[in-house]
Protein backbone atom coordinates (compact mmCIF):
# COMPACT_ATOMS: atom_id res chain seq x y z
CA UNK A 1 0.00 0.00 0.00
CA UNK A 2 1.42 3.34 -0.97
CA UNK A 3 2.18 5.54 1.98
CA UNK A 4 1.58 8.56 -0.19
CA UNK A 5 -1.88 10.00 0.38
CA UNK A 6 -3.26 11.30 -2.92
CA UNK A 7 -4.66 14.77 -2.59
CA UNK A 8 -7.00 14.35 -5.55
CA UNK A 9 -8.87 17.59 -6.01
CA UNK A 10 -12.65 17.65 -6.28
CA UNK A 11 -12.45 18.55 -9.94
CA UNK A 12 -9.90 17.67 -12.52
CA UNK A 13 -9.96 17.63 -16.28
CA UNK A 14 -9.16 14.39 -18.09
CA UNK A 15 -8.16 14.74 -21.71
CA UNK A 16 -9.26 11.66 -23.63
CA UNK A 17 -6.77 9.91 -25.90
CA UNK A 18 -7.57 11.18 -29.40
CA UNK A 19 -8.84 8.43 -31.72
CA UNK A 20 -6.26 9.20 -34.40
CA UNK A 21 -3.43 9.53 -31.87
CA UNK A 22 -1.01 7.58 -34.04
CA UNK A 23 -1.50 10.00 -36.92
CA UNK A 24 -0.53 12.97 -34.80
CA UNK A 25 3.16 12.30 -34.52
CA UNK A 26 5.52 10.86 -37.11
CA UNK A 27 7.20 8.63 -34.55
CA UNK A 28 3.82 7.21 -33.44
CA UNK A 29 2.95 6.56 -37.08
CA UNK A 30 6.25 4.77 -37.71
CA UNK A 31 5.64 2.70 -34.58
CA UNK A 32 2.20 1.65 -35.84
CA UNK A 33 3.71 0.74 -39.19
CA UNK A 34 6.22 -1.47 -37.38
CA UNK A 35 3.33 -3.13 -35.53
CA UNK A 36 1.51 -3.64 -38.84
CA UNK A 37 4.51 -5.43 -40.35
CA UNK A 38 3.81 -8.44 -38.11
CA UNK A 39 0.84 -9.28 -40.36
CA UNK A 40 3.22 -9.77 -43.27
CA UNK A 41 5.76 -11.64 -41.19
CA UNK A 42 2.91 -13.94 -40.17
CA UNK A 43 1.95 -14.20 -43.83
CA UNK A 44 5.43 -15.31 -44.76
CA UNK A 45 5.39 -17.94 -42.02
CA UNK A 46 2.07 -19.23 -43.36
CA UNK A 47 3.43 -19.31 -46.89
CA UNK A 48 6.44 -21.28 -45.71
CA UNK A 49 4.15 -23.79 -43.96
CA UNK A 50 2.18 -24.18 -47.17
CA UNK A 51 5.41 -24.94 -49.01
CA UNK A 52 6.45 -27.44 -46.34
CA UNK A 53 3.07 -29.17 -46.71
CA UNK A 54 3.83 -29.65 -50.44
CA UNK A 55 7.40 -30.79 -49.97
CA UNK A 56 6.71 -34.31 -51.30
CA UNK A 57 4.88 -33.01 -54.39
CA UNK A 58 7.25 -31.03 -56.62
CA UNK A 59 4.49 -29.97 -59.02
CA UNK A 60 2.24 -28.55 -56.32
CA UNK A 61 5.29 -26.91 -54.73
CA UNK A 62 6.21 -25.16 -57.97
CA UNK A 63 2.59 -24.27 -58.70
CA UNK A 64 2.29 -22.49 -55.35
CA UNK A 65 5.49 -20.55 -55.96
CA UNK A 66 4.42 -19.55 -59.47
CA UNK A 67 0.87 -18.66 -58.56
CA UNK A 68 0.24 -14.97 -59.41
CA UNK A 69 -1.29 -14.54 -55.96
CA UNK A 70 1.93 -15.52 -54.25
CA UNK A 71 3.85 -13.15 -56.52
CA UNK A 72 1.56 -10.28 -55.55
CA UNK A 73 1.89 -11.23 -51.88
CA UNK A 74 5.68 -11.21 -52.08
CA UNK A 75 5.87 -7.83 -53.79
CA UNK A 76 3.53 -6.42 -51.17
CA UNK A 77 5.17 -8.11 -48.18
CA UNK A 78 8.80 -7.44 -49.03
CA UNK A 79 8.91 -3.73 -48.07
CA UNK A 80 7.02 -4.43 -44.84
CA UNK A 81 9.25 -7.32 -43.85
CA UNK A 82 12.36 -5.29 -44.67
CA UNK A 83 11.02 -2.44 -42.53
CA UNK A 84 10.31 -4.94 -39.75
CA UNK A 85 13.80 -6.39 -39.92
CA UNK A 86 15.65 -3.11 -40.10
CA UNK A 87 13.69 -1.34 -37.36
CA UNK A 88 14.07 -4.29 -34.97
CA UNK A 89 17.75 -4.73 -35.80
CA UNK A 90 18.34 -1.08 -35.04
CA UNK A 91 16.75 -1.24 -31.58
CA UNK A 92 18.56 -4.39 -30.38
CA UNK A 93 21.20 -2.27 -28.58
CA UNK A 94 18.40 -1.06 -26.27
CA UNK A 95 17.64 -4.57 -25.06
CA UNK A 96 21.18 -5.87 -25.24
CA UNK A 97 23.57 -3.67 -23.31
CA UNK A 98 27.03 -5.10 -22.79
CA UNK A 99 29.63 -3.57 -20.53
CA UNK A 100 33.36 -3.86 -20.90
CA UNK A 101 34.44 -2.64 -17.50
CA UNK A 102 33.01 0.87 -17.23
CA UNK A 103 32.45 1.28 -20.96
CA UNK A 104 29.34 0.28 -22.85
CA UNK A 105 30.04 -1.69 -25.99
CA UNK A 106 29.21 0.65 -28.88
CA UNK A 107 25.53 0.15 -29.88
CA UNK A 108 26.53 0.36 -33.54
CA UNK A 109 28.55 -2.84 -33.10
CA UNK A 110 25.61 -4.64 -31.47
CA UNK A 111 23.16 -3.55 -34.17
CA UNK A 112 25.80 -4.24 -36.81
CA UNK A 113 26.24 -7.84 -35.64
CA UNK A 114 22.62 -8.46 -36.74
CA UNK A 115 23.38 -7.21 -40.22
CA UNK A 116 26.50 -9.34 -40.44
CA UNK A 117 24.45 -12.39 -39.39
CA UNK A 118 21.79 -11.46 -41.94
CA UNK A 119 24.32 -11.28 -44.76
CA UNK A 120 26.05 -14.52 -43.74
CA UNK A 121 22.77 -16.47 -43.60
CA UNK A 122 21.57 -14.99 -46.90
CA UNK A 123 24.82 -15.80 -48.69
CA UNK A 124 24.77 -19.35 -47.27
CA UNK A 125 21.20 -19.86 -48.48
CA UNK A 126 21.98 -18.56 -51.95
CA UNK A 127 25.04 -20.81 -52.06
CA UNK A 128 23.02 -23.89 -51.06
CA UNK A 129 20.36 -23.03 -53.66
CA UNK A 130 23.10 -22.58 -56.25
CA UNK A 131 24.52 -26.01 -55.54
CA UNK A 132 21.07 -27.56 -55.52
CA UNK A 133 20.24 -26.04 -58.91
CA UNK A 134 23.60 -27.15 -60.28
CA UNK A 135 23.12 -30.76 -59.20
CA UNK A 136 19.48 -30.91 -60.36
CA UNK B 1 27.84 34.07 -27.83
CA UNK B 2 24.96 36.01 -29.28
CA UNK B 3 24.65 39.22 -27.35
CA UNK B 4 21.21 39.85 -26.03
CA UNK B 5 20.52 42.85 -28.22
CA UNK B 6 16.78 42.43 -28.27
CA UNK B 7 15.95 44.23 -25.07
CA UNK B 8 15.30 47.37 -27.06
CA UNK B 9 13.58 45.71 -30.01
CA UNK B 10 9.83 45.56 -30.25
CA UNK B 11 9.72 41.95 -31.36
CA UNK B 12 6.95 39.94 -29.74
CA UNK B 13 5.94 36.31 -29.47
CA UNK B 14 2.41 34.99 -29.48
CA UNK B 15 1.73 32.42 -26.77
CA UNK B 16 -1.36 30.21 -26.84
CA UNK B 17 -1.76 28.90 -23.35
CA UNK B 18 -4.05 26.14 -22.08
CA UNK B 19 -6.34 27.42 -19.36
CA UNK B 20 -8.48 25.30 -17.07
CA UNK B 21 -10.16 27.00 -14.15
CA UNK B 22 -12.43 24.43 -12.54
CA UNK B 23 -14.30 27.06 -10.51
CA UNK B 24 -15.14 29.13 -13.57
CA UNK B 25 -15.83 26.45 -16.17
CA UNK B 26 -15.91 22.70 -16.65
CA UNK B 27 -14.15 23.05 -19.96
CA UNK B 28 -10.62 24.16 -20.71
CA UNK B 29 -9.88 26.88 -23.24
CA UNK B 30 -6.86 28.36 -24.99
CA UNK B 31 -5.87 31.91 -24.15
CA UNK B 32 -3.63 34.06 -26.33
CA UNK B 33 -0.96 36.32 -24.84
CA UNK B 34 1.61 38.53 -26.49
CA UNK B 35 4.97 38.70 -24.76
CA UNK B 36 8.21 40.48 -25.64
CA UNK B 37 10.67 38.38 -27.58
CA UNK B 38 14.14 38.09 -26.11
CA UNK B 39 17.05 36.03 -27.39
CA UNK B 40 17.85 34.68 -23.95
CA UNK B 41 14.32 33.93 -22.77
CA UNK B 42 12.98 30.44 -22.38
CA UNK B 43 9.29 29.50 -22.47
CA UNK B 44 9.24 29.54 -18.67
CA UNK B 45 10.46 33.18 -18.69
CA UNK B 46 7.60 34.06 -21.01
CA UNK B 47 5.10 32.34 -18.68
CA UNK B 48 6.54 34.21 -15.72
CA UNK B 49 6.26 37.45 -17.69
CA UNK B 50 2.58 36.68 -18.31
CA UNK B 51 2.00 35.93 -14.65
CA UNK B 52 3.86 39.03 -13.40
CA UNK B 53 2.77 41.59 -16.00
CA UNK B 54 -0.34 40.43 -17.81
CA UNK B 55 -2.45 37.87 -15.99
CA UNK B 56 -1.74 36.85 -12.41
CA UNK B 57 -4.30 34.04 -12.53
CA UNK B 58 -2.17 31.80 -14.76
CA UNK B 59 -0.92 28.78 -12.80
CA UNK B 60 2.07 26.56 -13.48
CA UNK B 61 4.86 24.77 -11.61
CA UNK B 62 8.54 25.54 -11.69
CA UNK B 63 11.42 25.84 -9.30
CA UNK B 64 15.08 25.59 -10.27
CA UNK B 65 15.04 27.21 -13.72
CA UNK B 66 18.04 25.10 -14.67
CA UNK B 67 16.79 21.68 -15.71
CA UNK B 68 17.36 20.00 -12.37
CA UNK B 69 14.14 19.98 -10.35
CA UNK B 70 11.94 18.47 -13.06
CA UNK B 71 8.84 20.48 -12.17
CA UNK B 72 8.43 22.70 -15.25
CA UNK B 73 7.52 20.01 -17.80
CA UNK B 74 4.79 21.04 -20.25
CA UNK B 75 3.76 20.39 -23.83
CA UNK B 76 5.38 23.02 -26.04
CA UNK B 77 3.89 22.88 -29.53
CA UNK B 78 2.82 19.33 -28.75
CA UNK B 79 6.23 18.10 -27.55
CA UNK B 80 6.92 17.25 -23.90
CA UNK B 81 9.61 19.74 -22.86
CA UNK B 82 11.22 21.27 -19.80
CA UNK B 83 10.05 24.85 -20.31
CA UNK B 84 13.16 26.20 -18.58
CA UNK B 85 15.16 24.50 -21.30
CA UNK B 86 13.16 25.61 -24.34
CA UNK B 87 14.30 28.89 -25.87
CA UNK B 88 11.81 31.24 -27.48
CA UNK B 89 14.31 31.80 -30.28
CA UNK B 90 13.90 28.18 -31.39
CA UNK B 91 10.21 28.82 -32.12
CA UNK B 92 10.27 32.49 -33.10
CA UNK B 93 8.53 33.99 -35.06
CA UNK B 94 5.90 31.25 -34.90
CA UNK B 95 3.33 31.24 -32.10
CA UNK B 96 4.06 28.91 -29.19
CA UNK B 97 1.36 26.62 -27.82
CA UNK B 98 1.80 25.64 -24.18
CA UNK B 99 -0.31 22.88 -22.64
CA UNK B 100 -0.08 20.68 -19.56
CA UNK B 101 1.77 17.37 -19.96
CA UNK B 102 -0.29 14.97 -22.07
CA UNK B 103 -2.19 12.02 -20.59
CA UNK B 104 -2.17 13.37 -17.02
CA UNK B 105 -5.31 14.77 -15.39
CA UNK B 106 -5.24 18.57 -15.18
CA UNK B 107 -5.89 20.27 -11.86
CA UNK B 108 -5.58 23.84 -13.05
CA UNK B 109 -4.14 25.54 -16.16
CA UNK B 110 -0.72 23.98 -16.74
CA UNK B 111 -0.69 21.97 -13.52
CA UNK B 112 -1.17 18.23 -13.74
CA UNK B 113 -2.10 15.76 -11.04
CA UNK B 114 0.99 13.66 -10.36
CA UNK B 115 -0.36 11.56 -7.48
CA UNK B 116 -0.39 8.45 -9.63
CA UNK B 117 3.26 8.87 -10.51
CA UNK B 118 4.24 9.25 -6.86
CA UNK B 119 2.26 6.09 -6.03
CA UNK B 120 4.12 4.20 -8.73
CA UNK B 121 7.51 5.27 -7.39
CA UNK B 122 6.42 3.79 -4.08
CA UNK B 123 5.04 0.62 -5.61
CA UNK B 124 8.34 -0.20 -7.33
CA UNK B 125 10.28 0.74 -4.17
CA UNK B 126 12.46 3.24 -5.97
CA UNK B 127 15.01 3.47 -3.23
CA UNK B 128 18.03 1.52 -2.07
CA UNK B 129 17.32 -1.54 0.07
CA UNK B 130 20.72 -2.85 1.17
CA UNK B 131 21.47 -6.53 0.55
CA UNK B 132 22.95 -6.85 4.02
CA UNK B 133 22.48 -4.61 7.00
CA UNK B 134 25.67 -3.31 8.42
CA UNK B 135 26.73 -1.56 11.53
CA UNK B 136 27.97 1.96 11.03
CA UNK B 137 31.29 0.85 12.44
CA UNK B 138 31.68 -1.63 9.57
CA UNK B 139 32.15 1.22 7.16
CA UNK B 140 30.60 2.11 3.83
CA UNK B 141 29.07 -0.10 1.17
CA UNK B 142 31.78 -0.31 -1.44
CA UNK B 143 31.20 -0.24 -5.16
CA UNK B 144 33.60 -0.31 -8.09
CA UNK B 145 33.40 2.18 -10.96
CA UNK B 146 32.36 -0.69 -13.22
CA UNK B 147 29.46 -1.53 -10.88
CA UNK B 148 28.47 2.14 -10.77
CA UNK B 149 28.48 2.32 -14.57
CA UNK B 150 25.78 -0.39 -14.74
CA UNK B 151 23.03 1.84 -13.37
CA UNK B 152 24.43 5.37 -13.46
CA UNK B 153 22.50 6.40 -16.57
CA UNK B 154 19.17 5.42 -14.96
CA UNK B 155 20.02 7.31 -11.80
CA UNK B 156 20.03 10.64 -13.66
CA UNK B 157 16.21 10.80 -13.69
CA UNK B 158 14.76 14.06 -12.34
CA UNK B 159 11.13 12.81 -12.23
CA UNK B 160 9.99 15.36 -14.78
CA UNK B 161 7.46 12.93 -16.30
CA UNK B 162 8.12 14.04 -19.87
CA UNK B 163 8.51 10.36 -20.74
CA UNK B 164 4.95 9.63 -19.54
CA UNK B 165 3.60 12.46 -21.66
CA UNK B 166 5.32 10.88 -24.68
CA UNK B 167 4.09 7.35 -24.03
CA UNK B 168 0.91 6.19 -25.84
CA UNK B 169 0.89 3.03 -23.72
CA UNK B 170 0.49 5.22 -20.65
CA UNK B 171 -2.06 7.37 -22.51
CA UNK B 172 -4.20 4.30 -23.12
CA UNK B 173 -3.74 2.72 -19.73
CA UNK B 174 -2.95 5.03 -16.84
CA UNK B 175 -2.27 2.07 -14.53
CA UNK B 176 0.89 1.32 -16.53
CA UNK B 177 3.81 1.79 -14.14
CA UNK B 178 5.47 3.69 -16.96
CA UNK B 179 8.93 4.62 -18.19
CA UNK B 180 10.53 6.59 -15.35
CA UNK B 181 9.31 4.39 -12.46
CA UNK B 182 10.41 1.24 -14.30
CA UNK B 183 13.79 2.77 -15.17
CA UNK B 184 14.23 3.70 -11.50
CA UNK B 185 13.27 0.20 -10.40
CA UNK B 186 15.93 -1.10 -12.79
CA UNK B 187 18.34 1.48 -11.40
CA UNK B 188 18.09 -0.08 -7.93
CA UNK B 189 17.90 -3.66 -9.19
CA UNK B 190 21.18 -3.13 -11.01
CA UNK B 191 22.88 -1.47 -8.07
CA UNK B 192 25.37 -3.92 -6.55
CA UNK B 193 24.56 -2.63 -3.04
CA UNK B 194 20.83 -3.35 -3.38
CA UNK B 195 19.27 -6.69 -2.51
CA UNK B 196 15.56 -6.21 -3.11
CA UNK B 197 14.97 -7.23 -6.73
CA UNK B 198 12.69 -10.00 -5.48
CA UNK B 199 10.55 -7.48 -3.61
CA UNK B 200 10.22 -5.39 -6.76
CA UNK B 201 9.56 -8.36 -9.05
CA UNK B 202 5.79 -8.65 -8.49
CA UNK B 203 5.15 -5.11 -9.65
CA UNK B 204 7.76 -4.92 -12.38
CA UNK B 205 6.81 -8.22 -14.00
CA UNK B 206 3.08 -7.66 -13.74
CA UNK B 207 0.98 -6.69 -16.72
CA UNK B 208 0.97 -3.09 -15.53
CA UNK B 209 4.76 -3.36 -15.38
CA UNK B 210 7.15 -4.03 -18.22
CA UNK B 211 4.65 -6.04 -20.30
CA UNK B 212 2.47 -3.01 -20.89
CA UNK B 213 5.36 -1.43 -22.78
CA UNK B 214 5.06 -1.82 -26.55
CA UNK B 215 8.46 -0.26 -27.17
CA UNK B 216 7.42 2.89 -28.96
CA UNK B 217 10.69 4.39 -27.77
CA UNK B 218 9.49 7.98 -27.47
CA UNK B 219 10.35 8.13 -23.76
CA UNK B 220 14.02 7.82 -24.65
CA UNK B 221 13.80 10.58 -27.25
CA UNK B 222 12.12 13.18 -25.04
CA UNK B 223 14.08 12.52 -21.83
CA UNK B 224 16.14 15.63 -20.99
CA UNK B 225 18.60 13.57 -18.94
CA UNK B 226 19.34 10.81 -21.41
CA UNK B 227 17.99 8.20 -19.04
CA UNK B 228 16.68 5.96 -21.84
CA UNK B 229 13.80 4.32 -19.97
CA UNK B 230 13.00 2.29 -23.12
CA UNK B 231 16.33 0.56 -22.78
CA UNK B 232 15.81 -0.09 -19.06
CA UNK B 233 12.44 -1.71 -19.76
CA UNK B 234 13.70 -3.86 -22.65
CA UNK B 235 16.62 -5.03 -20.51
CA UNK B 236 14.16 -5.97 -17.77
CA UNK B 237 12.08 -7.90 -20.32
CA UNK B 238 15.18 -9.85 -21.37
CA UNK B 239 15.97 -10.61 -17.72
CA UNK B 240 12.39 -11.71 -17.05
CA UNK B 241 12.39 -13.98 -20.09
CA UNK B 242 15.72 -15.51 -19.10
CA UNK B 243 14.41 -16.13 -15.58
CA UNK B 244 11.28 -17.72 -17.00
CA UNK B 245 13.23 -20.16 -19.17
CA UNK B 246 15.60 -20.90 -16.34
CA UNK B 247 12.67 -21.73 -14.07
CA UNK B 248 11.27 -24.05 -16.75
CA UNK B 249 14.55 -25.72 -17.68
CA UNK B 250 16.13 -25.81 -14.23
CA UNK B 251 13.11 -26.02 -11.94
CA UNK B 252 15.22 -27.04 -8.99
CA UNK B 253 17.33 -23.89 -9.34
CA UNK B 254 16.60 -20.61 -7.62
CA UNK B 255 12.88 -20.02 -8.10
CA UNK B 256 12.23 -16.75 -9.80
CA UNK B 257 9.13 -14.80 -10.66
CA UNK B 258 7.76 -16.16 -13.95
CA UNK B 259 7.98 -13.71 -16.82
CA UNK B 260 4.23 -13.54 -17.31
CA UNK B 261 1.33 -13.48 -14.92
CA UNK B 262 -1.50 -12.68 -17.28
S1 LIG C 1 13.22 9.20 -17.31
FE1 LIG C 1 13.81 11.18 -18.21
S2 LIG C 1 11.86 12.01 -19.02
FE2 LIG C 1 11.31 10.38 -17.58
S3 LIG C 1 10.99 11.41 -15.62
FE3 LIG C 1 13.16 10.72 -15.64
S4 LIG C 1 14.30 12.48 -16.45
FE4 LIG C 1 12.13 12.86 -16.93
S1 LIG D 1 12.34 24.69 -13.43
FE1 LIG D 1 13.47 23.00 -12.61
S2 LIG D 1 13.64 21.70 -14.34
FE2 LIG D 1 12.73 23.47 -15.20
Image (tube, rainbow, N blue to C red):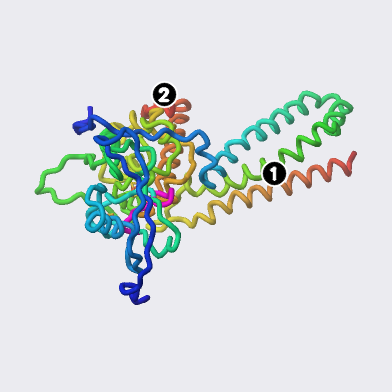
Residue B11 at x, y percent in the picture: 38, 68
Mark 2 lies on residue? B261
In the image, is residue B77 part of the stretch drawn in magenta? yes
Query: Residues at marks 1 and 2, common chain?
Result: no
Characterize the local packing of mark 2: few (<14), some (14-19) or many (20 or more) Cα atoms within 10 angstroms: few
Q: Which residues are magenta?
A: B76-85
Q: Nearer the viewer, mark 1 or mark 2?
A: 1
Which quadrant is the N terminus of chain B positioned in?
Answer: bottom left
User: Which label was assigned to residue B139?
Assistant: none
Ligand 2 positioned in quadrant: bottom left
Label 1 residue SS: helix
> In the image, is residue A122 above or below residue A60?
below
Mark 1 lies on residue? A79
Residue B26 at x, y percent in the picture: 31, 32
Is ligand 1 within 8 Å of the beta carbon of the residue shown at mark 2? no
> In the image, is residue A129 above or below residue B176?
below
Tell me the CA gap for discs 1 and 2.
35 Å
The residue under the point 32% across, 49% down is B73
Residue B123 at x, y percent in the picture: 27, 33
Residue furthest out toward the left: B137
Of A12 and B213, which appears nearest the observer?
A12
The residue under the point 23% across, 58% down is B53
Please state the chain letter of the residue tagged with numbered disc 1 in the rendered image. Answer: A
Residue A44 at x, y percent in the picture: 70, 33
* Res B167 visible: yes
> In the image, is residue B230 above or below residue B38?
above
Which quadrant is the C terminus of chain B positioned in?
Answer: top left
In the image, is residue B41 part of the stretch drawn in magenta? no
- Quarter location, residue B132: top left
Of A48 and B111, which appears nearest the observer?
B111
Amino acid sequence: MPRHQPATPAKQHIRPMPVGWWLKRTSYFLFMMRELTCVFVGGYALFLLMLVARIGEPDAFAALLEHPGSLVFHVLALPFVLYHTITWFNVTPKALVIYRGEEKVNPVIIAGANYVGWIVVSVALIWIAWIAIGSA
Amino acid sequence: MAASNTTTSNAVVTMDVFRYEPDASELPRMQRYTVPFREDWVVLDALNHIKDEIDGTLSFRWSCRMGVCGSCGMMVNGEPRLTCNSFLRDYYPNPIRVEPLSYFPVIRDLIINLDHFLDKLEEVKAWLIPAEDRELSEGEYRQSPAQLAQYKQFSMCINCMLCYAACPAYGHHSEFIGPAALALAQRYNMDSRDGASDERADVIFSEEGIWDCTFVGECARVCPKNVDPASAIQQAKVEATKDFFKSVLVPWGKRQQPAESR
